[in-house]
Image (cartoon, rainbow, N blue to C red):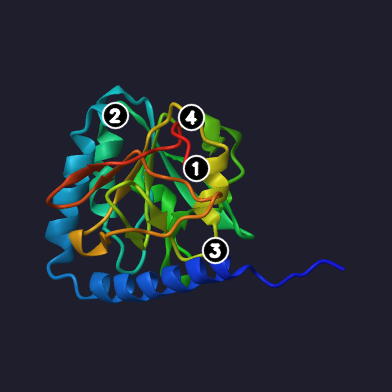
Amino acid sequence: MTNSNPSPQVQDTFTKKQAIRQQAHANRKNQPDKDRVSSEIVQRFMRLPEYAFAETVMFYVDVRDEVRTRQALPEALAGRKRIVIPYCVDGELELFHLEAMEELEVGMYKILEPKVDLRQVPAKRLDAKDLDLIMVPGVAFDANGGRTGHGKGYYDKLLEHARIDAPLIALAFDCQIFPEIPCETHDVYMDKVVTESAIYQGRGRSQTS
């Protein structure tokens, strides 16, 4: 019979991540002037060369205390890029080609999501491999691109299927940057982490641990 108990190392990583998440949530909640600072961060993202070169870009739609992105969506939609947003269905992230803010509605948990009647339109459905650039949310990061989310693995599952040449760029407030995020073999490193005061060059997926 196999032992289902996690190893001490795995348990230690889990405990450290939980402590970092708890501190990061508190830091993020107390972040002053979220609208202005978020706007600075998103504008930095949209000035990156990776953004300039990409044709299909995934934006996340902010919830709770994340760096706010929804105010930048109209500007992104006015450009010549194909803008994609994720939404959750049964624990998996699906991708939606967003063409107008009117295609969104407030769904469960007060999250802004694609209207239900549009989700099955074939032209609106995309695959992770269609993405040229992926904006990634998270709870905490480090300067090497280490990331921890809420622990449910939604984005880890999505990013497994993304092209290796599609940069993963995270947005975060300075207060979400920690000296080190303890990472496991399945964790994905960001190519860059953009905050209001810095752009960190992460390890990305092309480098081995």
Mark 3 crowdedness (10 Å alpha carbons): few <14, some 14-19, many ≥20: few
Horizontal and vertical percent position of residue 111? 42, 64
Q: Is residue 79 left or right of residue 84?
A: left
Kind of residue indicated by mark 1: Phe
User: Is the Cβ of the residue at disc 1 closer than 8 Å to that at disc 2?
Assistant: no
| Residues at marks 3 and 4, CA–CA distance in whole angstroms | 22 Å
The reply to whether discs 2 and 3 touch (Cβ–Cβ < 8 Å) is: no
Residue 201 appears at what percent x and percent y?
26, 39
Q: CA distance from mark 1 to mark 2?
A: 21 Å
What is the quadrant of the N terminus in the image?
bottom right
| Residue annotated with mark 2 | 50
Residue that badge 4 annotates: 164
Count of residue discs: 4
Q: Judging from the image, what secondary structure is the residue with disc 4 in?
A: loop
In the image, what residue type sits under mark 2?
Glu
Q: Which residue is disc 3 drawn over?
A: 152
- Residue 154 lies in quadrant: bottom right
Check the image and report above or below for 138 versus 118.
Answer: below
